[in-house]
Image (cartoon, rainbow, N blue to C red):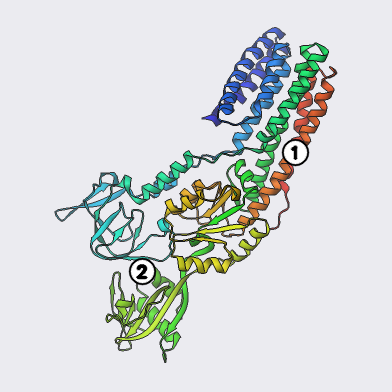
Amino acid sequence: MQKLSNYRRLWAVVGVGAVSLILAFVLNQPFGAQILVTVLGSLIALLMFIDMVKTLRSGKFGVDLLAITAVIATLAIGEYWAALIVLLMLTGGDALEDYAAHKANSDLQSLLEKSPQKAHLMVNGNIKAIAVDQVDVGDQLLVKPGEVVPVDGTIVDGSTTLDESSLTGESRPVDKVVGDSVMSGSVNGDASIQMIADQKAADSQFQNIVRLVKQAEAQPAHFVRMADRYAVPFTILAYVIAGTAWIVSGDPVRFAEVLVVASPCPLILAAPIALVAGMSRASQSGIIVKTGTTLEQLAKVKTMAFDKTGTITQGHLQVNQIIAEPNIDQERLLTLAAATEQQSNHILARSLMQAAPAQLPTVSDVKETTGGGVQAQIDGQVVRVGKADFAMPDGSIQKVEDTAVYVSADDQYLGCVTFTDELRPEAATTMSELHKLGIKNLMMISGDRKSIAQKIAKAVGIDQIHAECLPGQKIEVLKQVPEEQKPVAMVGDGVNDAPSLVTADVGIAMGASGATTASESADAVILKDDLRRTVVAVRISRATMHVARQSVMVGIIICTVLMLIASFGVIPAIFGALLQEVVDTVTILWALRARSIAIKE
């Protein structure tokens, strides 16, 4: 609504200017032009004054006070063309800043589209499709293969494997049997299950994530923009010079003449244009920065937090080790495991096939036990591949800590194949370069197990580890970062990261896979599948802010010189307003340098 209001004001000023020019120079009605500019100019100035009061009451100091005073002063002394020029500059700056901040309010449309919409209700053996909002606690539901679990509940019949990665961040599939709890938003595997609803949809885990994002958006961190920080001393300086000129000369016109050249165009225009140029530069490097404020925050980041799965790691499991029993060939072990699992749709079966030899032995009598494993006949032997108690029902296997499948042949244990979520090759370099940039506090906040998180963190050079965190716990970790270590940037990619990305001062989404909930909730999105882009984003942000500060200071210095000259009464108000456009041009050209920043990528 505010964005729409600022654009309307700009078009209103343009419209008033066009009509006034026609009245004054085509119809020869200068008095009519003056009345039109004075009335509508006063109305627009009043609306801006109301907005300014709201800004001041919220504890912030905007840059509009000086310009509004200049409009009122020039209208009071009859310099309506000067007032119109200042109004055009002022509304144009506000509209430009809105353009730079488009999409600042991240929406939840993607998240809502991914939320469960329907459930299969079981009544007396019959199945009825109902809206997920109609599910009551205690209802018995059927979840078919590949479907999203509609509400939180407990399995009462069947066993399956669930993909909970979008909720917990843990990449490995989770086996579920009768009596186990399941979370809404989990993706069912290859077997149907029956469950009892423990929560209504509104109280389930997925909707809790939606609520967390909304709450985080409703409580944005207080941040003072660069332009607002310069506004206070510049405004005081302008009033002192203008007031002194009035008192010494005794002429109120002198007050207006000083304020016209003091209109803070460098603050209103230069900084936003530099930020827009920096955002354009970032997009050239495959980084979409949604707001200028994001660039300001990112330039000052002192802490950077990372999710693990899909961010520091590649997000898919790969064969890590082949641990064979004595006198058992490792390649033979992998071949038997892959051959047995080749017809399965289980995520670990797909990972096995990627590592398997091209030629696999013939299998027969394949039997898959959901939540257990696969059994098959190979070369006259009964090969069993899966969980430890499936491969060897007598419980004789010593389990390994990593995700693994265990292999036996004719009830003889042969060994196991372990899996790991492979590190991004650029992860360690990224952490090293962030440290060199002065970001000393690097954190990993993951839903994965602590032992795995510690291993990953040590490999890449992470300073702090927070493991086994659900979305709400990730938010608490970010909130507990000490003030001296803020601003905080959070980098993630999954649904479970969305609340954290909104809570952090800067949320950065790894969005190479497309428009995800994380991308919608984030302040910046990395379009290339390259974690090092976080380093590039920081460098571009810092260079952009350097150019923005330069352009603001150049404008302030020129304006100060013009104010001192105007205080002697040698610059008429209309000429002063035109000089402001010259200052605008200089500061804009300087600010546009941010678009051609040379950054090491």
Query: Cα distance, mark 1 to mark 2?
Result: 59 Å
The percent position of residue 369, horizontal first and vertical second, equals: 28, 72
**Up-down: is 119 above or below 336?**
above
Instruction: Answer with left or right where residue 235 lies relative to residue 358.
Output: right
Depth check: give the residue in front, 451 or 320: 451
The reply to whether the C-beta atoms of the residues labelled 1 and 2 are less than 8 Å apart is: no
- Name the kind of residue labelled 2 in the image: Asn
- Image quadrant assignment for residue 448: bottom left
Foreground tag (1 vs 2)? 1
Does the rendering let one see residue 425?
Answer: yes
Q: Residue at label 1?
A: 551
The percent position of residue 158, horizontal first and vertical second, equals: 24, 64
Q: Residue at label 2?
A: 345
Depth check: give the residue in front, 580 or 261: 261
The percent position of residue 233, horizontal first and vertical second, equals: 72, 31
- Name the kind of residue labelled 1 in the image: Ser
The percent position of residue 18, horizontal first and vertical second, equals: 67, 19
Q: How many marks?
A: 2
Instruction: Answer with left or right where residue 414 lies relative to residue 557.
Output: left
Instruction: Answer with left or right where residue 284 lies relative to residue 310.
Output: right
Depth check: give the residue in front, 103 or 439: 439
**Up-down: is 325 above or below 248?**
below
Callout 1 crowding tier (Cα within 10 Å): few <14, some 14–19, many ≥20: many
Does the rendering let one see residue 358?
Answer: no
Instruction: Answer with left or right where residue 487 lies relative to residue 321.
Output: right
Q: Secondary structure at mark 2?
A: loop
Quadrant where the C terminus lies? bottom right
Residue sitting at 28 percent across and 59 percent down?
Answer: 144
- Image quadrant assignment for residue 27: top right
**Up-down: is 110 above or below 534?**
above
